[in-house]
Image: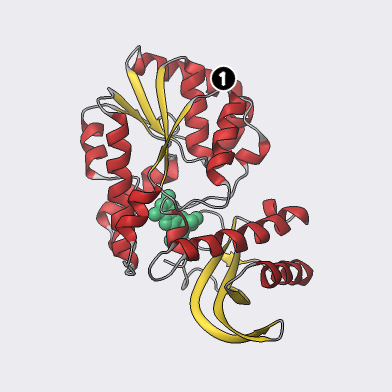
Amino acid sequence: PFRIDDLKREIIDGIRAVAGNKQVVCGVSGGVDSTVLAVLLHEAGVNVRAIYVDHGLMRKNETEEVQNNFHRMGVKIETIDASERFLGALAGVSDPEAKRKIIGELFIDTFWDAVGNAEMLAQGTLYPDVIESASNAKSKASKIKTHHNRVDRILELQAQGKVLEPLAELFKDEVRALGASLGIAHDILWRHPFPGPGLAVRCPGDITEEKLHIIRECDAIFIGKLKEHGWYEKVWQSYAALVPVKTVGVKGDERSYEWATSLRAVISEDAMTADWVELPYHILRETSHRILNEVKGINRVLYDISTKPPASIEWE
Ligand code: XMP
């Protein structure tokens, strides 16, 4: 029978064999894969630097939560606060692909600036990512969106055998099982996926601090409600996006002219297709009530009932 502890030992031995006493750097995002990766490297006792780049596009309190989570696990991470750099570069840019390109390139630059002359790079690539990048190279699908975790510089390193991908044969459920056997907390292992470009893909048009603040507040209320009612782990991914269209409303005794937020909750197997979730109305009602009462700048709450395809999961 398949034993997760045997797998863990095998992977840790593999890491030791390849890394030896070389310095290994890895990026951590707070997500499942990079967290399991960092903890594995830590367990293997290799000389590791785990780097967390805060691009200023994280959710409410996310950076603090990621820092606390790693602290709890006894794994040291270096936080690079690059939010000014990212938001500065993104100012006034509204084309989705241009935004992605800026974020992707800046991310790599920021990461490598921090890394300096590390000898090896570790990545939390999973088996489906391996398949996806192999088929992407050949298909037009790669043109739809440029995912930023596979860029030329990393491919170069890979060619030199300097990239460690200890999770490359595993599926997500196996990574979670591995994470649990490493003692990683349940809530970390069951976090919804969060895209590399962060809230940028949930903020159509140009990005401002004000818009990000609104998205963070709406998102935190929605996610909080899903957790409160036991729905968070029933859905694959959920979030609030900003719809930067002003419409007329009434707040107090006054006419308001404010933006809308769109809530999205989907189920999916692999993110290639997705279906919207028939959330109980009372959850939507409570969420909408709180958002409309508490979030300045929003006077309309929408629920996204679009399947993928034709819609994508994110807005950009
Ligand atoms: P879409 O919007 O393409 O999203 O239906 C599919 C899944 O991928 C996530 N996503 C990304 N993840 N870098 C990532 O690491 C990205 O650039 C990126 N874009 C989308 C998205 O959150 C969803 O889970």
| Kind of residue sitting beneath label 1 | Asp
Question: How many marks do you count on the picture?
Answer: 1
From this viewpoint, is residue 134 visible? Answer: no
Residue 204 to residue 168: above or below? below
Callout 1 crowding tier (Cα within 10 Å): few <14, some 14–19, many ≥20: few
Q: Residue at x 44, y 39 (%)?
A: 126
- Residue 52, x across and y down, in percent: 43, 37
Q: Is mark 1 within 8 Å of ligand 1?
A: no
Q: Residue at x 63, y 43 (%)?
A: 190
Quarter of the figure with the N terminus: top right
Residue ID for mark 1: 6
- Residue 147, x across and y down, in percent: 35, 53
Closer to the camera in the image, 70 or 155:
70
User: Element under label 1?
Assistant: helix
Closer to the camera in the image, 215 or 4:
215
**Ligand 1 located in image quadrant:** bottom left
- Residue 234, x across and y down, in percent: 69, 54
- Residue 201, x across and y down, in percent: 43, 62
Left or right, residue 168 beside residue 313: left
Q: Quadrant of residue 296?
A: bottom right
Quarter of the figure with the C terminus: bottom left
Closer to the camera in the image, 56 or 224:
56
From this viewpoint, is residue 108 visible? Answer: yes
Residue 267 to residue 179: above or below? below
Q: Residue at x 40, y 64 (%)?
A: 207
Residue 21 to residue 29: above or below? above
Q: Residue furthest top?
A: 21
Q: How is the image coloured?
A: secondary structure
Left or right, residue 33 beside residue 263: left
